[in-house]
Image (cartoon, helix red, strand yellow):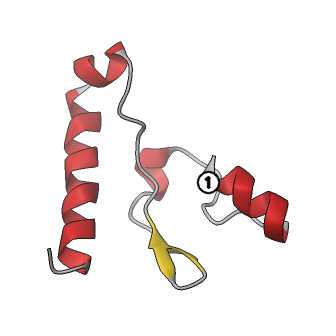
Amino acid sequence: MFNRICKSKSGKRVIQPGSTYKIRHNSFYYKEAQVFPSYVMTGKNFIIEKSKRKMVAEDLQKILEKHDI
């Protein structure tokens, strides 16, 4: 959804297309804010797929570290 909003305003995506697990280690920025591609935490597949839970936890940890929280 974030890409859709940005594309409607500027004509460009912020996050490149691709599988989340492949692009999540890249850096993406919207204006001066860093944007983190991650998984939506809903649905039964999130409960089943432990790797997605681990990746979301890693992404959240990066955000916390970046902001010294």
Of residues 67 and 50, the one nearer the viewer is: 67
Question: What x and y, as percent, mark residue 6?
Answer: 72, 62
Q: Quadrant of residue 48?
A: top left
**Relative to 49, 7 lies left or right:** right
Residue 19 visible to the viewer: yes
Residue found at the far bottom of this picture: 32
User: In the rendered view of the protein, which quadrant contains the C terminus?
Assistant: bottom left
Q: Residue at x 63, y 60 (%)?
A: 16
**Relative to 48, 69 lies left or right:** left
Residue found at the far left of this picture: 69
**Relative to 68, 41 lies left or right:** right
Question: What x and y, as percent, mark residue 66?
Answer: 25, 78
Give above or below for 62 relative to 59.
below
Give above or below for 34 relative to 47.
below
Q: Residue at x 64, y 66 (%)?
A: 14
Question: What x and y, as percent, mark residue 44?
Answer: 33, 14
SS assignment at label 1? helix
The amino acid on which the numbered mark 1 sits, given as a three-letter code, is: Phe
Mark 1, other Cα within 10 Å: few <14 / some 14–19 / many ≥20:
few
Q: Residue at x 24, y 67 (%)?
A: 62
**Residue holding disc 1:** 2
